Amino acid sequence: MKKGSGNGRLRHAIKNGCKGIEHSNFLDEPAAKLMSGKGAFLTLALHTYAEMNDWPGYLPPESAKKNSVVLEAGIRSLKIASEAGVTICFGTDLLGPLGSAQTREFRIRSEVLSPVDLLRTATVNPARMLRVGDRFGQIKPGFVADLLILKSNPLEDITILDSPDKYLFAVMKEGRVYHSRWSKLPVDAPTPVSFIQ
């Protein structure tokens, strides 16, 4: 894995076998084409920059301005990577109470990617990157059942993923129900210790 910080170093890492590129918000076309050709994966976490912009006073003025520039550059990098055929994965980089803002990534990326491509960034693509694509990331026989059961179709409106209180009915992991607001699908998994308050 390589955290992006300059396309020259990025190309060097890819040429030398690096398969995972993180936070490369200033990706250029030659680097994207090289990534695509070498089968490297790109994982951006654009929501971190969007979230910081929503907290006035969180960053000093100069840093807030730079943060906005980095967010816009990241959206351009996403477009460049998509057009070059790079496999894009969903990134998470928020901790604690800000973790709920991670779903904003779908809305931000929807400026560039289609809903089906967005869902692939959070399912099939990361499974392939982690080399477990033969049993994770798809809904089909023999695959691990990690599922979100939603009230609406995210292919029609990807932003529903930003409102789990309104649209999320249930969460299944490895076929066990960890969360459910649906009476016909009761919770059958033990509460993880980290969830106990």
Image: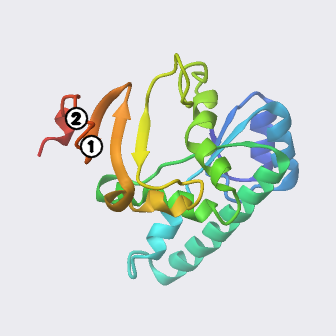
Q: Nearer the viewer, residue 153 or 55?
A: 153
Residue beneath label 2, please? 187
| Above or below, comparing residue 118 to residue 128 in the picture | below
**Horizontal relation, residue 105 to residue 177: left or right:** right
- The three-letter amino acid code for the residue at tag 2 is Val
Q: Quadrant of residue 162?
A: bottom left
Q: Earlier in the sequence, mark 1 or mark 2?
A: 1
Query: Looking at the image, what colour scheme do you see?
Result: rainbow
Whether residue 46 is visible to the viewer of this picture, yes or no, is no
**Horizontal relation, residue 192 to residue 157: left or right:** left
- The three-letter amino acid code for the residue at tag 1 is Ser
Q: Nearer the viewer, residue 182 or 166?
A: 182
**Horizontal relation, residue 156 to residue 191: left or right:** right
Q: CA distance from mark 1 to mark 2?
A: 6 Å
Residue beneath label 1, please? 180
| Above or below, comparing residue 61 to residue 99 in the picture | below
Q: Residue at x 69, y 56 (%)?
A: 114
Q: Nearer the viewer, residue 82 or 141?
A: 141
Whether residue 99 is visible to the viewer of this picture, yes or no, is yes
